[in-house]
């Protein structure tokens, strides 16, 4: 009984399709191997040469990536000689350019669909028409109710939900910082707790940096465009994302859910580097004052955070260190008294 319960708990369901057909099928699996086996059997594809890609942007899935995807995510089976780059992102960009003439674009796409016989192009046109009906620019619940499916009634608009989503991530970082207090050497524990209190006060003052995900905020503080487009900033050791990952969680429910798999990644690592260095600094301080703002920025701000697609989130050791010249507040030299 316990074994069956455990198995069901880890079972996830995905919508699977191929490049050559229009039909989508729900397939339950516990890992990538099982998904491939069932998918290849369903569509009669060769197992050894078939890959699984994310329908939205063409990302090839690893087992770990698959485990982080929400149920009912759409996937594409791609076999030898085939490739899938994804197109929803490009379509949504096109919609932003044409939203003032949405009706004309819809009618033109429908006319193309009537004469189009190639299955792959038919599929793209069908999805294009469906995406034309997305209400990206709508903010309020009553103007885009499908987007709010599963969202608590207290959220009346998209931006307030997205702001809270960012706040929750930042709060979780603070909880990790607070939980470490019990492990700090008793000689430095009070100083550590005082430092946490100062950081908490600062986080409340900046509203937990929820502005990062809020498209209604000023351009200088948000991470997205005014329409809600987010771009991956690339792995910690690169200046940009080579795959050009992007997403608009304001566009539809699936993108909103999928955005939860994107990470705010610490370049200088939180657990491996920042927090150990902070506790060391407290022990070695010799009455020097800790530069709490430096550690605050490393832990909670975009000075050290990068927004990354899950495929760009490298979990290996970053081998980056804190700047020792910024650990303590430098004392101003004492003025010489006039004789």
Image: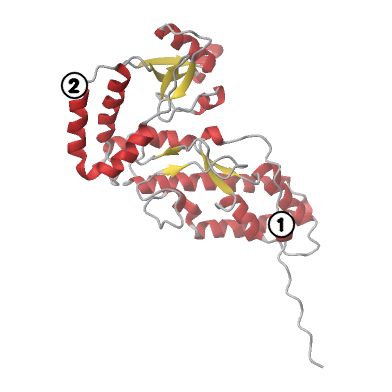
Q: Quadrant of the C terminus?
A: bottom right
Say which of marks 1 and 2 sits in front.
Answer: 2
The image quadrant of residue 283 is: bottom right
Residue 333 on image: x %, y %: 76, 76
User: Would you say 329 lies left or right of 56 here?
Assistant: right
**SS class, disc 2:** helix
**What colour scheme has been applied to the protein in the rendered image?**
secondary structure
Query: What label does residue 53 carry, if any?
Result: none
- Compare residues 218 and 202 and report the one nearer the observer: 218
Q: Is residue 312 visible?
A: yes
User: Would you say 288 lies left or right of 305 here?
Assistant: right
**SS class, disc 1:** helix
Q: Is residue 192 above or below residue 105?
A: below
Q: Is residue 148 visible?
A: no
Find the residue positioned furthest to the bottom. 339
Q: Earlier in the sequence, mark 1 or mark 2?
A: 2
Residue 263 on image: x %, y %: 53, 39
Query: What label does residue 114 carry, if any?
Result: 2
- Residue at position x 55%, y 45% from top? 306
- Residue at position x 20%, y 42% from top? 101
Residue 72 on image: x %, y %: 39, 23
Q: Is residue 294 above or below residue 264?
A: below
How many numbered marks have been drawn onto this rendered protein structure?
A: 2
Give the crowd class for mark 1: few <14, some 14-19, many >=20 residues within 10 Å: few
Query: What label does residue 190 carry, if any?
Result: 1
- Residue at position x 76%, y 83% from top? 335
Give the crowd class for mark 2: few <14, some 14-19, many >=20 residues within 10 Å: few
- Compare residues 203 and 273 and report the one nearer the observer: 273
C-alpha span from label 1 to label 2: 73 Å
The image quadrant of residue 6 is: top right
Residue 145 on image: x %, y %: 27, 38
User: Would you say 90 lies left or right of 98 here?
Assistant: right
């Amino acid at each position: 009984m316990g074994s069956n319960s455990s198995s069901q708990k880890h079972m996830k369901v995905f919508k699977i399709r191929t490049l050559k057909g229009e039909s989508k099928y729900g397939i339950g699996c516990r890992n990538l191997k099982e998904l491939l086996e069932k998918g290849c059997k369903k569509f009669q594809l060769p197992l050894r040469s078939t890959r699984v890609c994310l329908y939205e942007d063409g990302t090839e899935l690893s087992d770990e990536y698959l485990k982080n995807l929400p149920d009912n995510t759409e996937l594409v089976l791609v076999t030898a000689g085939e490739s899938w780059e994804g197109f929803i992102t490009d379509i949504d960009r096109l919609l932003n350019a044409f939203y003032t003439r949405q009706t004309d674009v819809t009618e033109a796409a429908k006319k193309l669909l009537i004469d189009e016989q190639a299955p792959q192009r038919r599929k793209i046109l069908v999805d294009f028409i469906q995406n034309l009906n997305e209400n990206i620019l709508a903010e309020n619940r009553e103007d885009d109710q499908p987007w709010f499916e599963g969202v608590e009634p207290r959220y009346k608009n998209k931006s307030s939900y997205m702001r809270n989503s960012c706040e929750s991530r930042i709060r979780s970082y603070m909880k990790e910082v607070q939980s470490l207090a019990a492990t700090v050497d008793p000689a430095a524990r009070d100083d550590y707790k005082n430092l946490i209190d100062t950081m908490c006060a600062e986080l409340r003052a900046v509203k937990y940096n929820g502005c990062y995900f809020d498209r209604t905020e000023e351009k200088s503080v948000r991470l997205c465009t005014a329409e809600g487009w987010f771009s991956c900033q690339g792995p910690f050791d690169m200046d940009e994302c080579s795959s050009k990952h992007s997403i608009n969680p304001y566009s539809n429910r699936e993108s909103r859910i999928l955005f939860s798999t994107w990470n705010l990644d610490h370049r200088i690592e939180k657990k491996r580097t920042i927090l150990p260095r902070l506790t060391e600094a407290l022990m070695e301080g010799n009455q020097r004052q800790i530069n709490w703002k430096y550690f605050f920025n490393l832990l909670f701000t975009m000075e050290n955070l990068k927004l990354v697609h899950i495929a760009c989130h490298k979990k290996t050791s970053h081998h980056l260190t804190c700047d020792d010249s910024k650990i303590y507040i430098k004392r101003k030299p004492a003025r010489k008294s006039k004789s």
